[in-house]
Every structure is written in C-alpha cells, then in structure tokens.
Image (tube, grey):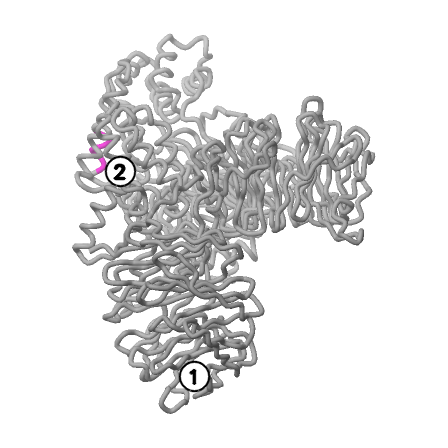
Amino acid sequence: MNVKSRNHLVLNRVALERDIQTSYIMDHMISDQVLTLQEEEKVKTQATRRDRAAMLISIILKKDNNSYISFYNALLHEGYKDLAALLHDGIPSITSYDKKNSTDGVAFCVRTILCEGGVPQRPVVFVTRPELVNEIRQKLYNLRDDPGWVTVYGMAGSGKSVLTAEALRDERLLEECFPGGVHWISVGKQDDAGLLMKLHNLCSRLDLDFTYAQRPPLNIGEAKDRLRLLMLHKYPRSLLVLDDIWDSQTLEAFDNHCKVLITSRDRSVTDHVTGRKYEVHMESGLSNEKGLEILSLFVDMKINDMPAQADKIVRECKGSPLVLSLIGALLRDFPNRWEYYVRQLQNKQFKRIKKSSSYDYEALDEAMSISVEMLNENFKDFYKDLSILPKDVKVPTKELHEKIVKQYKKHYKLCIPTPGEEDCMYWYNFLAFHMASAKMQEELCDLMFSLDWIKAKTELVGPAHLIHEYVEYSHILDQKNSLARGNFQKFLSLNGHLLGRQPFPDILQLGLCQPETSEVYQQAKLKAQREVDKGAFYVEWINKGMKNLSRLVVRPHTDAVYHACFSQDGQKIASCGADRTVQVFKAETGEKLQSIEAHDDEVLYCALSPDGRFLATCSADNKAKIWCLRTGQSIYDCEEHTEQVNCCHFNSGNNKLLLTTCSNDSLLKLWDVRKKHCQNTMFGHTSSVNHCRFSPDDKYVASCSADGTVKLWVTSSGNELKCIKIKDFFRNADELEVEVLPKCCSWSTDSATVMVAAKNKLLLLDVETSDLLEEVLSYQNSIQYYDFCPSNQLVAVVLSHYFVELWNTKTKTKVADCREHMSWVHCVTFSPDGSLFLTSSDDQTIRIWETSKVCKPPEIALKSELDVVFQDDEVMILGILNRTHLQLINGNTGHTVSLTDVEESISCCCLSEDLQFAAFGQENGTVKVLEVSGGRVLKSRRGHKTSVKHCLFTSDGQTLISSDDDPVIQVWNWELEECLFLEGHNETIKNFRLLENSRLLSWSSDGTVKVWNIISGKIEVNFACHKDTVLSCAISPDATKFSSTSVDKTAKIWSFKSSSILHELKGHEACVRCCTFSFDNKLLATGDDKREIRIWDVSSGELLHLCSPVTIDEGGPTHDYWVTDLCFSPDSKMLVSSGGYLKWWNAVTGESLQTFYTNGTNLQSIYVSSNFKIFVTVDNLGILYVLQMME
C-alpha cells in the first residue's frame, strides 16, 4: 500500500473503529478477493465490535492498494458515506505504469475503476465463456451514445453476475462507452423499505460532495429523483449495474433515462421501463469440457488426471456453474470423496453437499431452495409436486402436464386468475398448452370456448396469442366441436382489435352481435340475461344480417397505418405508420414478431425482401433504412435523399439484391443492399416521385411523379428508358391539358405492360410503344391506391372514401365491396399467391381478407338519411338504398315491405305518422309524395333549385315541408297543390321542427332561429341566437322552451313565452352539434365535436355531469367521431348518444353503461322508441341497426 493511502487509514483509524460493523464489509472484501477466509475468522474471534474493527484495519494496513480500494468501496456500499469521504483523497492514483501492467490480464486502471464502482472481482476459480462475454460487450456498445437497458438473464447459478463483471474488464469499452465509471449495486429480493435503503446507499456513494443530500430520502419516489439528478449531472456517461433484479416494480425505481445493465432470472422485468432494450440469454448449463475445467481448477489437477467420476458429476449437475463450484470446493478439501458426491447427486441428497468455501450458500439444497422460499406458501406446493421425478427415468410428459392442470384446477376451482395474482401470466400463456399436451380434450374445449377466458386473456396479453392457440390446437378442438371452434376463432379474429384496447369493451355485448346460430352468441345471450336480471344493460341487434368479409383484424399501431405488405411466403406481414414504428406479425393470427422504432418521423412505406431476410422502410425524416427482419436491428441507413422518401421496393434478388427509393426531391436511387451503398441516382422527374416498382425480370424500374409522368428506367445503368406523359390521356374536349397526378403503378408478369392509377382512372400502358392499351377502370371518385394480382386478374382499388373495391379486369365487373374500415384507407396489397389481400387505414387497423370469400355481390347499403316511425309494437323504417331506391323496412323482422325505383338520385325521405304516405326529395330539386301500400307516386313538384336536404310531413300528412341549400323553406299542401314560401333567413337552412298550432321552428347558418306560422307564412318570433351557424335545436317536452347549439362552442336555452334567453351554457371546447331535453324538462344534454357530452340543469343552467372522453390506448376518446345525436329515457335516468358508435349513459352519475360497436362509423342520428326499448341508426357503410333492449 502506498504511503498516502496508509497515512489516510492511520489518520482516520479512530473514527473507523468507532463506527463500522465489520461483517458486511468483510463480505465485500472477500468477494473482491483481498481478504481470506482465515483473516475473516481472525476478525470474528475478537470480543467486541470495536476490537473487530481494529483487527480488520490492522489486517488492511499490511495489504496492497487493492485492499484500500476494496475497503473504500465496501464503506460506500454499506452506507458509511461520511467515513468513505475521509478516505477518498487517499485512493491510489493511476500511473502510466499501472495502465500497462496487470496481474491477470486486466489493466490496473480498469481494476481501479471497477473496484471504485463496487464491481466484484473474479472468483478464485474462474472459467471464461468468451462468446457470452463478447455478446454482453457488444450489447453494451449499443449504449455508447444513448441511454438504454442491457438485460443478462438466465437461471439462478448460471453465471450471470460473474460473466457480466468479466465483460466490464475491458479498457476500450470503459473508455469509449462509460468514461464516467461503473456503479454496481446488488439488489436482490426487496420490500419497499429495503429498496429505499438500496437507493439511499447508492445515492450516498455517488454524492460524495453532498450536492444533493440535504437529508435521507423519505420515500422511493424522492430517492429515484435524487438518483436521476446524480446520474444526469454528475455521471451522464457512466454505467449503472443492477445485479439480481427480481421484479419489474423494483426496476422501475431505477428507470431514470440512463445507461443500465441488469442481471435477472426473469427476462420480462424490463417490459415496463422506457428506452431501448437489448438482451443476452445466459445458458443454464456449461459444456462438458467447461464443467471439467472448473473441477480441475478447484482440485488442482489436469483434466486427464481426474477420476472417471468427474464426468458423472458434470453430467449429474447438468453443467450448472453453481453446483459445480460447490462440489469443486468440497473436493478441494476432501479429495477422496469423488464417488461419495456422485452418489449424493444421484440420490438427490443435496443437504449432504455442504460448503467448505466462501460460496454464498451453506449447502446445495439451500442454493436451490432460495428461490422456492421466496414464493407464497400456497405456491410452494407447485414446486414440491413437480420436483419428485425419479433419477434417470424418462419424464412422463403427459402425466406431468396433467399434474400442472390439476394444480391449476385445485387453486382456481370455479374462477380464473386475476392480474393481481403472481402466477396469472403463466396460466394465460401456457394453460392451453398443458391441456393440449396432456390430451385433455374436455378441459381444453371448456377453456377455449369460454367468453370469460377470452375476455381475461385478451385484456392481459391481447388477442393474437389466443388466435394462435385456436389454430395450433384446432385438431383437438375440432374433434369435439369444429363449428364452435370456428365460431370463437372468427369472433376473436374480427373483434380482437376491440378486445385488446382500453377501456375494455363488454365482451357479452360483442358476442350478442354474432349470428344466432353461433356458439358465441348463445353463450353471450345466456350470460347477458343473467346480468340483466341483476340490473345490467344490454341490447340485441334484431335485424343483423350483415356478414363480415374480412378474415382477421389487427391493430398493431397507435396511429394511422400508411402501408403494409406480405412476405414472399405469405406468412408474415410488415406494416408502418404515423406512430413512426414498423410492426411485423403473423398473417394468420396477428402474433407480433417484431416491433421497431424505425424513424424520427412518420414511416410512409415498407417492403420485405423476397428472401425474407430484410425489411426496408422510408420516412418523412428524409431517410430510408434497411433492417434485419430476424433481429429487428438496423443494417444500413440510406441518407442521400434531401426530402421525404415516399416509397421503396426490393427487386427479386436473383443476381444482386437491390432496393429502389423515390422522394419528394424528384430523385430515385438504387441501393446495393449487401454492399451498403448507393449504386445509381436517377434524374429526370421535375417534381416529387410518389411510387416506384421493379419489373418482374429486374431489368427496369417504373416511377410515378407529381410532374404528370411515368418514367421507365434501366436498372443496370440508371438511365431513363421511357417517359410517358399521363396527362396526355386526360385531355378535355378542347384538347387542353389537365393536371394529373399518377399515384401508383405495377407491372405485368412478362414486364410488357405497366398499369397506372391516375385521377379517377386505371390505365394499361404498353412498355415498348408507350401507347394506352386500355382504360381498365374509370370512376367518379379519385383512386387513392391499387394493387393488381396477375394470378387471378383481380385489381383491388382504394377509393377516396372508406371503401375498397375488387374488380375482374377481364370481364370489367365488380366482384366485391370491402367496406369495413372506419376511416380513410391508405393501402391495399395482395399476397404473392393472390389468396389473401390486406388493407390498412387511418382507423389504426389492418384487415386481412380471403380473396375467394369476398368475391360476392355487394351487400345492401343505405344512405344515412332515413325516417323511422314507431307504431304500437312495430318499427317501420324508410331508407334510401343505393341512391335510387326507396325501401320500407320492417325493423322487427328486417324484411323489406316495399321498394320503389326512382330514376334520379334520392337525397332525403320521410314518412307520415299514420304510415299512409311517404315522401322523398331528389338531387334535381324534385319532391314527390307516394302511397306506402302500393308505392304509387301521388304528387310530384320540382320547386327547388338544388338538391333537397330535408323533408317533413305535418301531423295530418297533407302538407310536406322541405328545404334545400337556399335560405327558403317551402310548405307544400300536396293535396291542394298549393305552396307557401317561408323567406326570412339569410343563409342555408340547417333544419326545422314542427311546433303546436301550425307553427314551425327553423334554424340556419345565419345564426338565427325563427318561429313561423305555416298557414300565413309569416315570422312570429325571430331569435338572434348565435354569432355563427346554429347546428341544432331541441324543444322541451312542455313546449315552453327550446335550446340551440352552435359552431361558436356554446349552447343556449330560450323561452318561447318571453322570447328571451334563459341561460348561456359555456364550457364546450368545440362545435356543439346536438342537444336534447329530458322528459321531465329538468335536464338538457349537449354533445360536441370534441366528443364530450355535458348534462345541464335547465332551471339554473349549471353543469351537472361531464361524460368525458374515456382514454382508449394512446388517447382515443368516448366516441370515435363527433357526438351527433342524443336522447333521454322517459324516466330521465338514462341517455343514449350516437357518434362513432352508440353509447348509453347513466344520466344521474354521468357514467358509461354500455357501448354498441357498429361495423362502420359516423352515425348521423339515433331514433328511439317512446319506451326507450328500440334504437335505430345507420352507419357510414350503409348498415342498418335495429337494437332492442334486453329485459
């Protein structure tokens, strides 16, 4: 020991002897191999604590610099911060000579840094595993520039801590990645008090100058904050090593956005912390050669000189470093006991294997049982029951699986595990596996055909794993009931994206939407009826008939999904989107395979290489990237574009694997994937390039640009081959050019033709001549994207709404409408064999469709404008079918009562109260009245200049009131053929409602509400209600008041009697779109475009309840659309609202009671029977819903 260090020890000896407890300090020093067991015994023999401290210091004074450093670190580890500060200036300095010399291949500067940080030194017997040590080091290099987590995980005794410490003995690693040092803390199993002490001790070690330590932290949160400040300001480039982490809750206390390495038995401990994560798996057993090497080092013999029993010991120990170390230490002291320890191992007599070394455990059984003892008493039986298999007997796996299932049934008799129970995740992940392995068909079917199990499992782990189990165990389930298995698998495949999100939907309500023959429906009906008897609320879809055409719905992203594609074998799907990530999952089940935080901005496109090894992405961050699909690691960043990269595509890779990219910078680039460089840059476009595609023979690349051209390029040279001006095919009658934006393109299998989507057309072009061969399709709407499947000559087209259509290009016939997305569709892609195709959307979902099963006639689709009359127990609905048909539907049965064909498009319709007459308005301004019974048109009048927006019968059915986009309302007595014009509004009429005594209430974009006498045509009262458009009005049941809502974000209550305002209701943060009074006139409900519903006291104008947006995974709200309509129940205790779907609320508390998820979205209105038992609406897909409350 150098003089300076020795003087500091002698100078502070009195203070050290007075305060320290030697036992724990000696443990650290023994671990660092600077104190022997004999010296430990010498200290322990001293009579008093002070004598023991004095003896320890006397021993240290006779040792070297390493002993001083180890003693200093032990003081810090054990919380003697003040004492450590006394010794700090005496820490030996590092000289150039020290850097170059070491006793064990480790530079002295490294040993000093690690000793200061409390990193354990090598054990007496050390056998390296270089491949694992190098793997740990490689993972640590990932933390060089950014914070993150490296997890070294494996079974107890597998060598995690020893090899982690060895990996840190690398001068280059420490200099480049962790120049601030390494701080090692042994954590272990801790309660809150123990964890707080660990955090406090660590902070004390790091805060030697007392910058942040005014007092000890009072709680874990305060300690975590203090550690964060220390790591951020004092040790930003240091590594924190957390040894032996038992659970994620403990780890969260160290989640401070720093560089952390942990060792743990549990691979999943980092699931709930933030940052990049890297893993190293520590195999539990050594090879036979390594096991023999450990024994040879302990007994100081060459491997060839050891007795034959050495091989038996290694074999019986299964290569466990822990067991081999214990037995090796024993054999060193008792060299003639080789056969004895073989017998003890074979007979499982672990208590006989006792230590004669400094190992952590007294005996092998103690080392094995340390984990078992940490278990809850109830769970120890599991271990005891499953650890009695006899020696050298082949494990009877079926019986073992049966035992596990019996243990489950014993502990969870009539219930299922809840998230609060420690073992719940194991059962949800593996119970079905054990049942299937044990061939327990009855038990497996009972489990997999249980809505309770589906609900609990999907809420915890999502739907994909459960779908996988239906596929994996279908051969067992189908033996019992193949139909039921199909029902449950389909139910989960189509509803899993809802079940896996928060707030978790009511699975029984989802089940009630299934076909009545379905096992899912029957189980849901039975359970729901029991819940209704207890006071719950459920509705049945009584006219259900719409079939879901998609096979699987997955929700892999938290924002819009811009693109998705199949792997070459059709087994995997890669997707990308606005959340900046790329997700890879199984096409059959949706099981996630990779999740990559890919870019710094939205990821616009992704592509998979034909050999399945690489994934390419491109982004609005101006980069394209190439990834290893298997590991998810980045291989190469393509950074030569200067603006956002719109598309990327791999060639077939037969000769050389290439990637082409195109960008808003008007350039295309060709990248050599294996050589990792740009091979060619293709100049020629004068505006952004939107899409690019290799030809099937890899000779050419096609590109589409906003400059109105499609260019063909030679792959080998990057030279332009052809330039086809797409706008030439869109010249108008005067031969003038029009602006055309080619969206995307594809090649024929023989590379002879190119298909291009531009504006509203799909064009087929000849590559050789550049001629237009044919107009494949032409629409009224713009084509956003398409994909062509050469194997079956089908083309899938994304239109500028929520629809995807399939067309047969040979027959020019539409074979299917795919209308299940709830928002804009961005992409459609066929699988390589054409059997499947997928669509991705703004609604965060990807739908996978079976091509053969969607090739059916389109389903009936109604417009959102309809009228409903509730008469006795009947529900009659008048709807507009496919724009030119008027359909009267019996809501109770779903059957069509009558159907009327009309030549011109219908824009609105209504029924008379007695169901004698129907009326409709048309887009050409005509209104017609017809008799319901025969469908005969009674009267027709073309009095509107533009499309008719609203029509309404008076109570006697003799007068029809209508309006269009003009500020005039027309009152037409169709029997007398007399028409009255109500003129007074200055802007478009938004809507109107009838009042008593031949009066009419109307509201307009001019901000006014007017009361009219429809006999005289005069204005009785004019209300200047709002400064902006009035969106809705509601009339109180006692007809004394009305409410108005507006774009100006307010609602108001008005008095008819005084013609004045009663209350202005403020608080909405968006347009207030709808309102309704309760039947007792006491409450008013308002709904807005922020998707909030507010319930007000009518008499005082005070806000009673806010039915606030309930967060759904990353911020989705109560309604996925504006709140469009509201209605109270007769007793004023319930409220129903429409928007993205239907919701029922407790009007007394503002709590949600039930949600009905429609197939589509954008519900414009909700019609409710007077007894609040029947509800009618239609979604944007044209699907009609007649719902009946269960009683």
The amino acid at mark 2 is Glu
Q: Earlier in the sequence, mark 2 or mark 1?
A: 2
In the image, residue 966 sits, relative to residue 489, either above or below, namely: below
In the image, residue 1042 sits, relative to residue 456, either above or below, namely: below
- Would residue 730 be found to the left or right of residue 932 on screen? right
Residue 595 position in % (x across, y down): 51, 40
User: Residue at point 43% right, 88% down?
Assistant: 1020
The answer to which quarter of the image holds residue 538 is bottom left
Label disc, if present, on residue 519 of the rendered structure: 2
In the image, residue 397 sits, relative to residue 562, either above or below, namely: above
The answer to which quarter of the image holds residue 418 is top left
- Would residue 1006 be found to the left or right of residue 550 on screen? right
Q: Quadrant of the N terminus?
A: top right
Residue 193 position in % (x across, y down): 32, 53
- Would residue 983 be found to the left or right of residue 871 on screen? right
Q: Is-magenta flag for residue 649?
A: no
Residue 147 position in % (x across, y down): 55, 47
Q: Quadrant of the C terminus?
A: bottom left
- Would residue 1138 be found to the left or right of residue 695 on screen? left
